[in-house]
Image: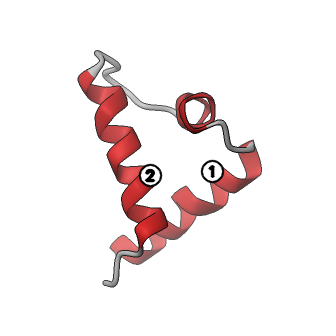
Amino acid sequence: MALYESGEMYLETILVLYKRGLERVRAIDIVKEMNFSKPSVSIALSNLKKDQM
């Protein structure tokens, strides 16, 4: 699995949000943190899940 810079950025954001005390990081939390659109975050998360398998 090749993790690109954008994927790494999403994973880092998830980690930051988790360390702030969110037990479950939702896509909407990432949208607000990164100031990206909902569809962009949804596609990126889907790609990360797909690459995991």
Residue 7 occupies quadrant: bottom left
Please name the residue that numbered disc 1 is placed on: 41
- Within 10 Å of disc 2 (Cα), the crowding (few <14, some 14-19, many 20+) is some
Residue 4 shows up from this direction: yes
In-image side of 44 versus 35 (left or right): left
Q: From where the camera sits, is residue 49 visible?
A: no
Residue 46 lies, in percent from the top left, at 56, 62
Residue 19 location (% of width, % of height): 24, 25
Residue that mark 2 sits on: 10
Please, which residue is most extreme toward the top here?
Answer: 21
Quadrant of image for the N terminus? bottom left
What secondary structure is found at the residue carrying circle 2?
helix
How many residues crowd mark 1 within 10 Å: few (<14), some (14–19), many (20+)? some
SS category of the residue bearing label 1: helix
User: What residue type is disc 2 on?
Assistant: Tyr
Q: Amino acid at mark 1?
A: Val
Horizontal side of residue 30 vs 12, given as left or right: right
Q: Is residue 52 above or below residue 9?
A: below
Q: Residue at 31% of width from left, 33% of height from top?
A: 16
Q: Position of residue 51 (x, y in %)?
A: 41, 76
Which one is nearer the viewer's eye here, 46 or 36?
A: 36
Q: Are marks 2 and 1 in contact (CB under 8 Å)?
A: yes
Which residue is at a point 73% across and 43% down the rendered structure image?
38
Residue depicted at 61% across the width and 28% down the height: 32
Q: Nearer the viewer, residue 53 or 44?
A: 44
